[in-house]
Amino acid sequence: MTERAVDPLVSLLQQLRLQQPHSKSPSEATQAQLELFLNRIASLTGALRDAPPGDASAAAARLLLADLAMVAAQFRGRTSELGERLAQALERAELALQGGAGASAASE
């Protein structure tokens, strides 16, 4: 492996640092962080496609896997939260229907 072939990947690894997002709320910070992960995943995927094997490639591959795991964890968390909200909404709708059915039976 030549030093010249590694330079673009090493340069990319040096540039790709997670920055603190400048946001006003926790959800904005989470979204900004997710966008940084996704951009880094795209950059690393492209760079690794043509990179020769070596220490820089191994480091980039580990970083790519870690970023993919973080994105997957955020999506799992969001789907869990959405599932809980849906379950609560269905429970409220069921209670409202039961309450409405009891009121119409009493009026007859």
Image: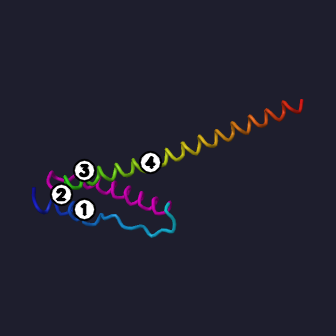
Q: Name the residue at the left extreme.
A: 2
Nearer the N terminus, badge 4 or badge 2?
2
Q: Residue 15, percent across and down?
A: 28, 66
Front residue of 71/8: it is 71
Q: Main secondary structure of the magenta part?
A: helix
Q: Residue 24, percent across and down?
A: 51, 68
Q: Which mark is residue 13?
A: 1
Magenta residue span: 27-56
Q: Which mark is residue 49?
A: 3
Measured Cα–Cα span from mark 2 to mark 3: 13 Å
* 52 to the left or right of 13: left
- Amino acid on which the number 3 mark rests in the picture: Arg
Measured Cα–Cα span from mark 4 to mark 2: 29 Å
Residue 89 picture quarter = top right
Nearer the N terminus, badge 4 or badge 1?
1
Quarter holding the N terminus is: bottom left
* 58 to the left or right of 1: right
Q: Does the magenta-highlighted stretch encompass residue 42?
A: yes
Nearer the N terminus, badge 1 or badge 2?
1
Quarter holding the C terminus is: top right
Nearer the N terminus, badge 3 or badge 4?
3
The colour style of the image is rainbow
- Amino acid on which the number 1 mark rests in the picture: Leu
Q: Residues within 10 Å of mark 3 (few under 14, many from 20)?
A: few
- Asked if the residues shown at circle 1 and circle 2 are in contact, with their CB atoms under 8 angstroms apart, the answer is yes
Measured Cα–Cα span from mark 3 to mark 4: 26 Å
Pointer 2: what residue? 56
Front residue of 31/12: it is 31
Front residue of 105/27: it is 105
Pointer 4: what residue? 75
Instruction: Report the mark closest to the observer, 3 or 4.
Output: 4
